[in-house]
Amino acid sequence: MTGYDSDVFRSAYDGLLARWPADREALTVPTPCGETRVNACGPRDAPPLPGGGGATSLSWYAQAADLARTHRVYAPDIVGAPGLSIPAPGRHPRTLADLTGWLDALLDGLGLDRTDLGGHSYGAWIALSYTLHAPARIRRLFLLDPTLCFTGYRPGYLLHALPMLLRPTPGRVRGFLEWETGGAAALTPEWLRLQEAGARFPAAKPVTGPRPAPEALRALQTPVLLLAAGAGKVHDPGRVTAGAEALLPRVTTAVLPGVSHHALPQAAPKELTSRLTDFLSD
């Protein structure tokens, strides 16, 4: 893509990576879609916890240290999305089946037969979709302000996002994120720099799809924790939690006040940390 500078992106990536715990480890896992970069931390003999999001694996930096006290945290860069994963020629995920197949191969490559799983935003949609695909592999699932799982986007959010989506530039990315989060003060400088550097990343079109089928959600017996962003502008948090409660038989929900969608999980309010660790420790 015109204007992309790989050195600037890598510098920004490494800058945010420095905020991860000191015992972090960079792994490369071969999959049919290409080489997947996984940032890992925590005791190797602790229960595993893969997590995903839509803004590189590094977005978990604010939660990684706390989660790594009880889990071995694995945060992958989605193949074809901004990050350090390297897609195989013509093999990046194009369908939901491709995406779940990539996660099958990733968990196999990490030696994880059964694991906890979590995601934020688009990553939460991926995590929920994968759990429906392979419920026997997932012990517990957490969803942070999931998009397109239980309700749609607010029209105002889409209108504000449209210029950035049509012609992404660092300035448009910054302006959009400042609007949604209520100002730059809510954002970590290293995280914001990485989002700006990724504006022109030569990413593949992300895999999207319909919301999970209601009958599939009603049949899911995996324990789920859903935390919605009370100050988010993406969707109505009340509708998200109500939709999940109406469909998932083993779900616990809560709305975290004062935090926006894009500030999760980096905002790391105390309530978020305690709820995640309590849920995953059961």
Image (cartoon, rainbow, N blue to C red):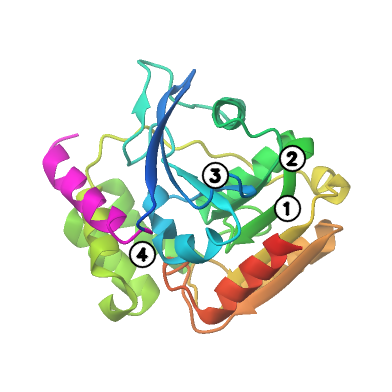
Q: The N terminus lies in which quarter of the figure?
A: top left
x 52%, y 56%: residue: 121
The magenta segment: 1-21
Label 4, label 2: how far apart the Cα atoms are: 32 Å
Which quarter of the figure is the C terminus placed in?
A: bottom right
The reply to whether dot 2 and dot 1 touch (C-beta < 8 Å) is no
Give the mark, 2 or 1, whose residue is nearer the N terminus. Answer: 2
Please state which of the two labelled residues, at mark 1 or mark 3, is closer to the viewer.
Answer: 3
Q: Position of residue 104 (x, y in %)?
A: 62, 28
Eye-nearest disc, 2 or 1? 1
Three-letter amino acid code at the position of disc 4: His
Please tell me whether residue 30 is drawn above or below residue 164 in the rendered image: above
Instruction: Return the x and y of residue 265 as percentages of the image width and height.
Output: 47, 65
Q: Amino acid at mark 3?
A: Arg
Label 4 secondary element? helix
Examine the image and state in which quarter residue 99 appears.
Answer: top right
Q: Which residue is mark 3?
A: 44
